[in-house]
Amino acid sequence: MGGLWWWIHARSEREILETFAWVEVVTDPETVAWREADDSLEEVDIDAPRMPAGLDGLRAKRDAQRGQPGFGALAGRDVVYLRRRWDEEDDEDLAAVYLMELGPDGRRLREVELAEDGTGLKSGPDDWPFNPPVVDLFDPELVGQEISRGEFEEQWARARQADTGP
């Protein structure tokens, strides 16, 4: 999918996640080796007063979130369950409510799309062509979207499998 890459010198992975919104710390040995071969990546010290373009906005966003109630409350959990409304700006008919089971990196594990009539379509990783992180678990706004595992499982059991084939 692409994205912006930096080598960030920090004391821990968590410190990076607490300092910058919407970042992913890559630890996969193959990916790290691939990026190490690219000597064009900018190195950044997490304590530097100025950040490069792109990273500066992610730090500013995190700074604005840090003092809010619920900041980081969902981070560090193995599984998080959310109810989120996704609005399509250009097409009201595409707005939907999703119940999501998320891993500790903000990636979907399972999902139920709820229709207005209460019916649901369920899907999992085998149904998605790619699965990037869909939420930043440090975001304090997510706390109000949290649901219980029981609520998710109830809807999952009632939902029908999404048709993802041709």
Image (cartoon, grey):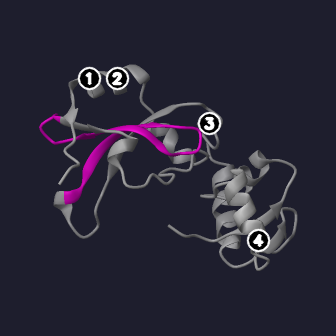
Was residue 58 drawn as part of the magenta stretch in this picture? no
| Picture layout, residue 128 above or below residue 42 | above
On the rendered image, what quadrant is the C terminus found in? bottom left
Marks 1, 3: nearer the viewer: 1
Q: Which mark is residue 73?
A: 3
Left or right position of 15 against 23: right
Sequence-wise, the earlier of marks 4 and 3 is 4
Question: Marks 4 and 3: which is nearer the front?
Answer: 4
Question: Which stretch did the figure color magenta?
Answer: 94-119
**Which residue is label 1 attached to?**
157
At x 20% / y 50%, what residue is drawn? Answer: 165
Q: Earlier in the sequence, mark 3 or mark 2?
A: 3
For the residues bearing labels 2 and 1, Cβ distance under 8 angstroms: yes
Judge from the rendering whether residue 90 lies leftward or rightward of residue 78; answer left or right. left
Q: Write down the residue under mark 4.
A: 37
Residue 113, located in which quarter of the rendered image?
top left
Whether residue 26 is visible to the viewer of this picture, yes or no, is no
Q: Residues within 10 Å of mark 1 (few under 14, many from 20)?
A: few
Residue appearing at x 85%, y 55% in the figure: 10
Q: Where in the figure is residue 95, as x and y percent of width and height?
A: 24, 55
Q: CA distance from mark 4 to mark 3?
A: 36 Å
Q: Is residue 64 left or right of residue 166?
A: right
**Residue 21 vs residue 4, the one in the foreground:** 4
The secondary element bearing badge 1 is classed as helix
**Secondary-structure class at tag 2:** helix
Residue picked out by circle 2:
153
